[in-house]
Image (tube, rainbow, N blue to C red):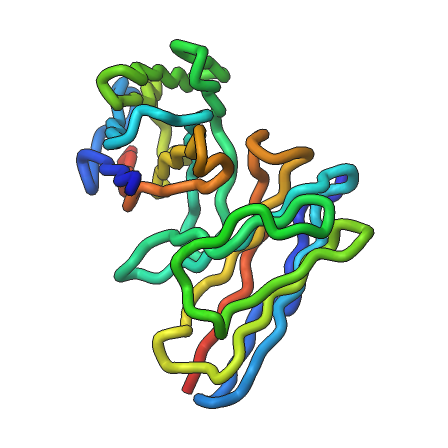
Amino acid sequence: KQEVTQIPAALSVPEGENLVLNCSFTDSAIYNLQWFRQDPGKGLTSLLLIQSSQREQTSGRLNASLDKSSGRSTLYIAASQPGDSATYLCAVRAGGTSYGKLTFGQGTILTVHP
Amino acid sequence: KAGVTQTPRYLIKTRGQQVTLSCSPISGHRSVSWYQQTPGQGLQFLFEYFSETQRNKGNFPGRFSGRQFSNSRSEMNVSTLELGDSALYLCASSWREGSEQFFGPGTRLTVL
């Protein structure tokens, strides 16, 4: 059974700081990994999708990496802003015989203070 | 392009009742997935549909069911509601299985 863990559970940083969020998974037979952000009481916004054959994806100030063999992904946020404050979730989509099922981590609550 | 829409946005029911939630995917998307989000359990996968067929199912009791229509719209039904069913129910669509998922705003269900 796939388990996804996100560390840290919460993070508070001053504006302008670069930061890294971590995601680890127990079963390396994945199809892809997706990072989301969720604002309080809202749905999820897709940030980046990394296919299992890729090592990283970039979008603006965001960079996500994937190391399938070690079961890890990181989300790097450059020059953080107060508007980046949200809960960040990583989700792993199973490959192989369980293709399609998405397993989420518990999330990292990020607070960027001015 | 319109995003994923879910109706209703808020719902209050009592124990023992049943409820039906609706999801309209992004135009052109043929895959719809449903998730339950609670403070204690986080986000848990319910089921996924593609071309009107259930492709995957999570570990939820048979009280939770769903279906997808020929226009890709989907509904999920929960029968014999329990207090523990109170949650945010999220729907996500993608153009095919395994591709990037886009989420709707969710339906907040409260069971009294």
| Image quadrant where residue B111 sits | bottom left
Say whether residue A84 is left or right of residue B73. Answer: left
At 42% across and 38% down in the image, what residue appears? A37
Say whether residue A66 is left or right of residue B62. Answer: left
Q: Nearer the viewer, residue B4 or B65?
A: B65
Picture coordinates of residue B112, whole percent (x, y): 41, 87
Picture coordinates of residue B51, whole percent (x, y): 73, 45
Say whether residue B102 is left or right of residue B62. Answer: right
> Is A62 situated above or below B74?
above
| Image quadrant where residue A76 sits | top left
> Is A77 situated above or below B63?
above
At 27% across and 18% down in the image, what residue appears? A18
At 50% across and 68% down in the image, what residue appears? B108
**Image quadrant in which the N terminus of chain B is located:** top right
Q: Nearer the viewer, residue A44 or A52?
A: A52
Picture coordinates of residue B16, whole percent (x, y): 47, 89
Q: Residue furthest right?
A: B71
At 48% across and 71% down in the image, what residue appears? B62
> Is A26 situated above or below B106?
above
| Image quadrant where residue A38 sits | top left
Picture coordinates of residue B48, whole percent (x, y): 57, 49
Tag count in the figure? 0
